[in-house]
Amino acid sequence: MQGAFIEHERILGQLGAECAELRKGSDLQGGFDGIILPGGESTVQGKLLRELHMFGGMKEMIASGVPVMGTCAGLILLAGRLSHDTAVYFGTLPVTVCRNAYGRQLGSFSASAHIRGLRGEGQEFPLEFIRAPYISEIHDREHTVPLAVLDKMPDGSKGENIVGVRYQNQVGLAFHPELTDDSRCHKMFLGMCSGKSMS
Ligand code: GLN
């Protein structure tokens, strides 16, 4: 209902997947195999999810194992904790996330990295960051798989900056795979939706 959903639909369409936009509570009964939470503004999205009567139903679906991929603001909605913030949205992904961690000047930047579990893993994936969140902590290291790592922290210092994770049925990405021409993240997600994926 808000943010960069058209871009996700474009890539999913190219891959031959059928998409439906979820805009109200009754849309959740539509029968679908997975949910993408797009980038945008998490505070607005969180508010709309409640106002449009989708919040509880969607949270239950995610908790019960429906595959979900959250990109940027979508990652914020999934996060179990937000640093410097008392808000929590779905809270189903065991990570702490810091919103807008890269500051105003460095709000948007590009990078590239290997992403675990993608076909052609050896080929780096283009990463687009827009006022991106930073995954500052992983609470359940045993079950959370880092998918992509940058060697630079939000403050520019050297360090291991995990920019994508998978936890069971949930993928959280700090970047925007829908803004690139590389469809491999979406392909991986469709694999999860059809039950054919890395575990
Ligand atoms: N800064 C946004 C937020 O806090 C996320 C930005 C994005 O999704 N590109 O929700």
Image: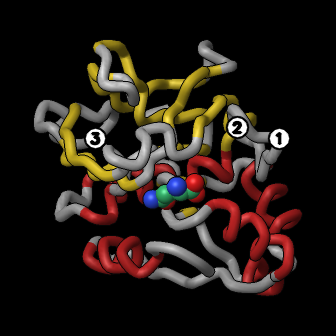
Q: Residue at x 73, y 53 (%)?
A: 62
Instruction: State the quadrant of the N terminus.
Output: bottom right
Identified by mark 2, the residue type is: Leu
Amino acid of disc 3: Leu
Q: Crowding near pointer 1: few (<14 within 10 Å), some, many (20+)? A: few
Q: Which residue is mark 1?
A: 86
Q: Residues within 10 Å of mark 2 (few under 14, many from 20)?
A: many
Q: Is residue 121 visible?
A: yes
Q: Residue at image x 65%, y 80%?
A: 22
Q: Is the C-beta separation of discs 2 and 1 under 8 Å?
A: yes
Q: Mark 1 or mark 3: which is in front?
A: 1
Q: Secondary structure at mark 2?
A: strand
Give the residue at mark 3. Answer: 118
63 or 173, nearer to the observer: 173
Mark closest to the chain's N terminus, 1 or 3: 1
**Residue receiving disc 2:** 82
The label number, if any, that marks residue 183 in the structure image: none
Pointer 3 and pointer 2: residues touching (CB < 8 Å)? no
Label 2, ligand 1: CB separation under 8 Å: no
Quarter assignment of residue 99: top right
**What residue is shown at x 52% (from left), y 44% (from top)?**
171
In the depicted view, which residue is nearer to us: 115 or 173? 173
